[in-house]
Amino acid sequence: MSTDTGPPAKMQKVDGPIEVSEGDQSQDFDADTQKALEDIDACQNDIDVLNEKASEEILKVEQKYNKLRKPYFDQRNELIKKIPNFWVTAFVNHPQISAILDEEEEECLHYLNMVEVEEFEDIKSGYRINFTFSSNPYFNNSYMSKEFHLATTGDPASKSTKVDWKDNMDLTKRAQAQIPNRKRRHGFSRTFFHWFQDNADPSADDIAEVIKDDMWPNPLQYYLAPDIEVGENGVGDHDDENEDSVVVLGDDDDDDDELDDDEEVYQIDDDDDDDELDETNGLGETIDSVEDEDEDDDDVEVLGEEDDDDDDVEAVEPDEGETKGE
């Protein structure tokens, strides 16, 4: 179809005809397809307008609830201060954060008293992660923050407080001097303080996102992580159930004479005292069959005694014959 057959309406909404290119060839849409595409485009525009309105309303709701949550976050921080080493324990128990902690940094974070995520009022422009430290042998800072915001170009940007390291206590230099056994990034070993000072690619800052969206909303779950894992996996309960439902009979056990129906037997005692079982003797034979075998053994012994008596009778029979002959 030639390029001059399209309806006039087509040229009003798009710059030139919509074409599908295949190599060096191009093809115009027919009138019906062109009309359908234009209608879809108009429908999509309406959807985009609604999405923008939804985003604006969602931001207003988030702003409202951020203000409502703020006093509870403050109260939680005050309570956390009463628990020694709360934040370092939560960090060590978190899989992503612990992956970038080396031993010296872990020691340093024992002086970390408070972590706080502060979202900007309009939310969409960025947030700030604040760290408060007590006096420590590593640096002079009592407060440090890392901020994420939109640059004037509209691209994500970040900046962080300069760490005022004490003499010979720069943990980033110590980490570089060592031979770390962890993933390397930007040519050096990635550690917690390397992350804090690294502002090269804020759009790919996974640790900041983890702290903001996972650690900060509920740090208690990571402080209690080992206990929670035991409870969820039911390790303790599982062991108790096994102790109740599985019985191993030892050679010296004299009290395990009767078993419940749901108990399993892994070893059979040879003691004569353990003669009575409810279900099986562990060899796939019922107790009745075992008792029958015992009874059969008794019968054999009785028959043996009768055979001895018969022998005595046969020995007497010649005398009887002689008597009859007489």
Image (tube, rainbow, N blue to C red):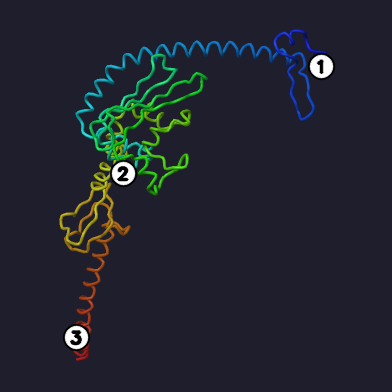
Q: Which residue sits at x=77%, y=16%? A: 30
The answer to whether 285 is drawn above or below residue 57 in the figure is below
- Point out the image quarter for the N terminus: top right
Query: Picture coordinates of residue 233 (x, y %)?
Result: 32, 40
Q: Earlier in the sequence, mark 3 or mark 2?
A: 2
Residue 40 is situated, as x and y percent measured from the top left of the image, at 65, 14
At label 1, which amino acid type do we have? Thr
Q: Which residue is mark 2?
A: 103
Circle 2 Cα neighbour tier, 10 Å, few/some/many (<14 / 14–19 / ≥20):
few
Q: Which residue is mark 3?
A: 316
> In the rendered view, does 129 fall on the left or right side of 309?
right
Q: In this image, 293 relative to 24: left or right?
A: left
Amino acid type at mark 3: Val
Along the polypeptide, which appears first: circle 1 or circle 2?
1
Local SS, label 2: helix
Q: Give the SS element for disc 1.
A: loop
x and y, in percent, of residue 257 in the image: 18, 55
> Which residue position holds label 1?
3
- Image: 281 above or below 30: below
